[in-house]
Amino acid sequence: MKANMDDLYLFVLTVRHGGISAAAKAYSLQRSKVSRRLQELEKSLGCQLLIRTTRHIELTDNGRLLYENISQPLTTVNQAVNLLENQQKELQGVLRMAIPAALITSSMFASLIDQYSASFTKVSLDIVHCQDSVDLKRDNIDLQLLPSTCKVVNEDYVQQTLLPFPCCLVASPAYIAAKGTPNRLDDLYDHKILVSRYNSTALSDGLTIGLCSDDLRLVQHMAKSGHGVALLPVILVRDALASGELLPVLTNESFPEIKLTLIYPSKAYLPEKTRAMVKLLRDTFVSRK
């Protein structure tokens, strides 16, 4: 019969505290349970380990030999377990996130990061620009945000769809003045089109693509500068439309939405720092329009 690891740990605790009662009290255990488990340990090893007296215990030679050889390793194991448990429960450490460059530059995401940092001051954020799905465990990344059009490399990861972003066509007043206003979809063949990789398939084939970029801010900048008609999320161009820097194009047409997917390894073993970010992301990108 092999010795039980829990019983070995109880043996070490009993020796350190100088008795069964003291060890049971220190760890909120019943004295009878500790005594019974020590008896089971002696039975499994086939030798007596402790000499029990009224006030304290003494080690037999076998007991001393066992204690000297296992006390330090068990201490190391216990410390490691406690460290991992504390890291899971406490809001501290490094939180690594993989985020598309377009989202990183958005004011909504900047506000979210500001809110998280202000609330959880002991967490250090490590944000990497990433346009494609990564293997979170292999790359030591806690969570990732991706447009739903991107394939996730590990289907076992948790995937949650967040706020969908409706898209619209826009162009600068200078561009409209020079090239004219498209009145129907077929008119787009006479214009340069500015798109992102995430919505490039939303328009008809054969259009002249003046720019295709992962960076939505760059697409918006090129549209403001008069380089073409851009397909962009409404939330990104709302201010520019209000100020007149950009004008809406083909407002009666509807275009596919860009949806964000939140990806993380597991719900069961999610550290609190990650759980807090997941909640904030869901609150932000589900409730806001």
Image (cartoon, helix red, strand yellow):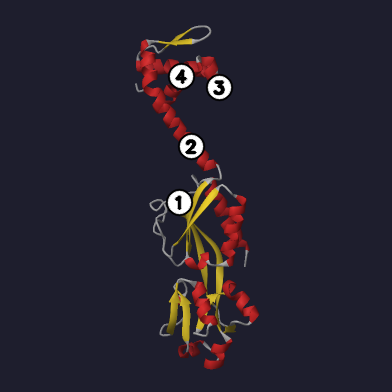
Query: Which one is nearer the viewer's eye here, 33 or 283?
Result: 283
Q: Is residue 186 visible?
A: yes
Q: Which mark is residue 37?
A: 4
Question: Foreground mark, 2 or 3?
Answer: 2
Q: Residues within 10 Å of mark 4 (few under 14, many from 20)?
A: some
Q: Give the SS element for disc 1.
A: loop
Q: Is residue 4 visible?
A: no
- In the rendered image, the vertical position of residue 252 relative to residue 256, given as above or below: below
Q: Which mark is residue 26?
A: 3
Q: Are marks 4 and 3 in contact (CB under 8 Å)?
A: no
Q: Which residue is mark 2?
A: 83
Q: Give the SS element for disc 4.
A: helix
Mark 1 and mark 4 lie on one chain; the one further toward the N terminus is: 4
Q: Give the SS element for disc 2.
A: helix
* Quadrant where the image shows the N terminus: top left
Mark 1 and mark 2 lie on one chain; the one further toward the N terminus is: 2
Say which amino acid is labelled 2: Leu
Say which amino acid is labelled 3: Ala
Q: Are marks 1 and 4 in contact (CB under 8 Å)?
A: no
Mark 1 and mark 3 lie on one chain; the one further toward the N terminus is: 3
Q: Which mark is residue 265?
A: 1
Query: Who's the residue at 53% across and 93% down the image?
Result: 178
Query: Who's the residue at 57% across and 62% down the image?
Result: 110
In the rendered image, which quarter is residue 176 located in?
Answer: bottom right
* Quadrant where the image shows the C terminus: bottom right
- In the rendered image, the vertical position of residue 33 relative to residue 88, given as above or below: above
Q: Give the SS element for disc 3.
A: helix
